[in-house]
Image (tube, rainbow, N blue to C red):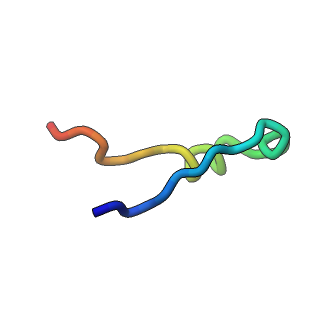
Amino acid sequence: MFDRTYYATHPDMMECVSNEELRDRYLIDGLFRE
């Protein structure tokens, strides 16, 4: 049923993260149907 599990992230862990890493970590594709 679920493809991926998302966990909360502490802001200090995200200081040196690139936009691409943020996108890979938090973008949810296919959330809504057309």
Residue 10 lies, in percent from the top left, at: 76, 41
Q: Is 33 or 1 nearer to us in this picture?
A: 1
Q: Dividing the picture into quarters, in which one does residue 33 lie?
A: top left
Q: Residue at x 48, y 44 (%)?
A: 27
The C terminus - image quarter: top left
Residue 21 lies, in percent from the top left, at: 66, 50
Examine the rendered structure and indicate whether residue 34 appears above or below residue 21. Answer: above
Residue 16 lies, in percent from the top left, at: 84, 44
Q: Dividing the picture into quarters, in which one does residue 23 lie?
A: top right
Looking at the image, residue 15 sits to the left or right of residue 30; the answer is right
Which residue of the protein is positioned furthest toward the left in this rendering? 34
Looking at the image, residue 13 sits to the left or right of residue 1; the answer is right
Residue 14 lies, in percent from the top left, at: 78, 42
The N terminus - image quarter: bottom left
Looking at the image, residue 14 sits to the left or right of residue 5; the answer is right
Q: Residue at x 69, y 44 (%)?
A: 9
Q: Is 30 or 19 nearer to us in this picture?
A: 30
Q: How many marks?
A: 0
Q: Residue at x 76, y 45 (%)?
A: 17
Looking at the image, residue 31 sits to the left or right of residue 24; the answer is left
Q: Residue at x 30, y 42 (%)?
A: 31
